Amino acid sequence: MRFQLMTLWVMGFPGESRILLSFDGKRVSASRGDTVASALMKSGFYTFSRSLKYHRRRGYKCGRGYCRACLVEVNGIPNVPACITRVEEGMRVRSQNALPSAEFDLLSVLDKFPGLVSYKGLYEGLPGKWFVWPLSWRLIEKLVGLGRFPQEHGDYGKGERVEAEVLVVGGGLSGLAAASLLAEEGLNVTLVDSMETLGGYARLDPLEDAGLHERHEYESPQEAARELSRRARSAGVKILTSTDAYGLYPSKNLVGAYVRESYRSGRHLAVKFKYLILATGAYEEPGLFENNDLPGIMYDYGFRRLIVDHDFKISGRVAVVGRGWRASRLAAFLEAAGVEIVGPYGDLSSKDSERIIAAYGRKKVSGVIVDAGNRRRIGVEYIAVAKGFYPALELAAQAGVRLRFDARIGAHVPEHDGKLRVLNNVWVAGSLAGYLSYADRLASGLLAAYYVLVAEGRREYAEKAAALASSLRAGVLMSG
Amino acid sequence: MQSSRRSDYIIVGGGVVGLSIAYHLARLGASVIVVERRYVGSGSSTRNAANARAHFFNREASLLAWESLKRMYRLGRVLGYNTLFVRRGYLWLFYREEHLEGMRSYMKTWRELGIPEGRILDVDELARRYPFLNLKGIVGGYLADTNGRYHHDAVVRAYWKNCIKLGVQVLEYVEAEKITVKSGRAVGVETPVGLLEADKAIILAAGPWTRILAKTAGVDLPIEPIRKEAMVTEPLKITIRPLVINTKVNAYAQQTLRGEVLLSSATPLDVPTWSYQHTYQFPLRAAKAMVETIPALAAVNWLRQWAGHYATTPDHNPVLGYVDEVEGLAVASGFSGHGFMLAPAVGEYMALLLEKGYLHPVMAPFSPGRFREGRLIKEDLVIG
Amino acid sequence: MGKVIVCFCEDVTLEEVRRAVKEGYRDLEHLKRLLGIGTGPCQGKQCLVTVAKILAEEAGFDPSEIRLPTFRPPARPVPLGVLAHAELEEE
């Protein structure tokens, strides 16, 4: 592995404290701020594991722990999301579902014979040949599963109970706006966010935003995120980061959460609330083109995070996928960072004249095929996908909130009463509620806070709420 | 597609039991309509733990279960659809000597009935075979390795596809509202799409809802919807092959055919309710119980929880056959948590009863009349 | 031809979803149980909306008519060890 040693030598400049870990037995050097994912990619490892059935390459994608494409084994603990796990000295990182290694996996031959492991092959592929079925399940039993059975048991602390007057789930613009205002008004507010740093999506967007500037006097989403985080802290909001709210149990006014301390430790949190604001944000719509799962294809957030948080050097061209304002902003962001881009392009889901129909590459993306009347191949190092937003509506939906299809965003949103209320003491805000622009997301958070204050008997906020609600409606019409 | 409103049989409930009966009736040449209030399998058939065993603690249920298990073995072959049955075995873990002794003596009964009796494992053998177990407090185990797992969705689809091939009409999202009785005879089922008429009989295979429908025909069946919950984890390479049952806390865990660990536990929340609502407590209790039994599970990620029903009768045994009060009305319900594994045999025996008038002796003890007549099926051995 | 992946956790392709819809599986719940979409580690966070769109297109439904499968906890995976150490509330 001459290439790797070279990388090590180039990256390990003296004076900076380096952390050493291993990946499938090979040495990887990382800096303190790295996650396992960013460390592996900086060392040239883009394939972390292999996929469940076809043993296709899997690696970093969403950058915030939800897409689970970057699962690896760490020190004997399986299915650890590399993108939200900090590097630690001596970590033994192993690829999963690969024989013998992620880079060279014998079972990737299954990708060539999809009939064997697809549902067709499984249930109907060998009709009349029932005598081979016992063989087929013996084989299946060997093949299924991602990680190994845990070799280590982890270290999980005793659970805790927390009482909050207001619980805000999600520390993006809307959640932060709601939490800081409510805390400033004297309420006891707890805010949980699944990432290590508050600010959500906005934190990674440093470019000017006209709407945000006009309506909220922040220059950029990043500035808004920073400023609101500061306000939330100084107003005394209890902030729990790296905390996943996993369940909402409305009859008990309770949210179950998991505080992640490391890849092998953490604790349970039962948060009792009087009022709850759900500002869980949204998931990103995947790109639809051939080989859309090659390493090097990432979602908008994941791509930005590499650059902003991990100082990842982008060498070579980036193809941007998506036709909306998010793709344009991403393109502008990358250009400002000195990265050469192509696109933005549509994909198989759009009727665009210029669309990506396929990606190609052996170990990771090395190019795209663009169809614009004629087909051409363009060499790229990465593909950044910035298409639609799917509201992260699990908590609301679990709790029995009705869902409504929103044609504007092409996905379901929680149905509220016209005043953001979805249950007796639960409100929604931000992109979860279907607001798309930064300005609207922030405003909807404030609005949810106004409604909570009204519910708390603060009449003076009723008028404010009405005014903000009508301007927000106008805003939605403008951006829609 | 031309759909008829009239057929020999109307089956209420498009779960595995209803579909199995429909399949066997259609094979005997009868015309059948199945009505399902939601999607096919949407009740207990998609919520069960996908395990089949022959070993029950009374003769009647053991015999029926063994007949069914034998059919389960070759179900895929018969239906031309791989139902992925795997003989993973059941492993009961005992924490009290008297339970182990009880089991040892009950093995004789199974042997007499011709059921493969399995064997007792001592603590050393448990440690050797299942190194993932925490053996603290365990006095021994009982392994029945002829029992196993199937893929429940595959089984449902296998019956469904065969039903359609044989001309059975399966109506999804059609809710049976009322049984129409004319001069003491059940003649039709009222639904939002109109009255469905049955020339020969109406069969209620609607899980706990069977009771509500039977009531519309003036029949009272003691079937209660007891909520039961289960949960699964992220998929792992398969290590926990048998169904590991902790008899102390009445909880179990096993890896599914896809490698997820499936867990369940008896909890104080197993109460009569129509709701499929999951609870906050269940995952905490089930995790506590099974992490104690299999400590490595602590580092496995939980992925989903759900709720279903045990359609439970006073003696925890099914209700199978014609009701006495109304003519032309039959029932296959009240399985008390074991309906899926019994469906292959029950479908066959019910079809024989309905179409040929033959009451199979293995099914006979489960008649609906037994509750009124006070002939409840007694449990010979109680563990836990 | 390379695969267009719709469900990244369970390796389900666009082609497979289209074929299943053509075969008559006209319900997200059935597609889920046949193909495994939405049952993997991400629990449908990436595939459900895409599959719903494909179903609407192929079967000629209006997207608003499509019934979503039931949502259940957890919204994010949680180690069983965390649950096992949680405080139990009195019911």
Image (cartoon, coloured by chain):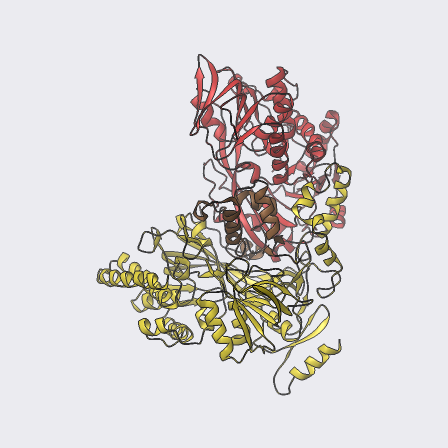
Along the horizontal axis of the image, is A58 left or right of A310?
A: right
- In this view, B257 is above or below A190: above
Q: Most extreme residue toward the bottom, as rendered?
A: A14
- In this view, A349 is above or below B263: below
Q: Quadrant of residue B33?
A: top right
Along the horizontal axis of the image, is A20 left or right of C62?
A: right
Task: Looking at the picture, tell me which residue is in the foreground, B109 or B319.
Answer: B319
The hue used for chain B is red
Spot occupied by residue B147 in the image (x, y as percentages of width and height) = 70, 37
Number of on-image labels:
0
- In this view, C90 is above or below B350: below
Which chain corresponds to the colour yellow? Answer: A
The hue used for chain C is brown
Spot occupied by residue A292 in the image (x, y as percentages of width and height) = 60, 61
**Residue C36 seen in this snapshot:** no
Task: Looking at the picture, tell me which residue is in the foreground, B114 or B182.
Answer: B182
**Residue B10 seen in this snapshot:** yes
Task: Looking at the picture, tell me which residue is in the foreground, B288 or A285.
Answer: A285
Q: Most extreme residue toward the top, as rendered?
A: B183
Q: Could you tell me which quadrant the C terminus of chain B lies in? A: top right
Spot occupied by residue B166 in the image (x, y as percentages of width and height) = 62, 27
- In this view, A352 is above or below B349: below
Spot occupied by residue B184 in the image (x, y as percentages of width and height) = 46, 13
Task: Looking at the picture, tell me which residue is in the foreground, B307 or B117.
Answer: B307
Q: Quadrant of residue B341?
A: top right
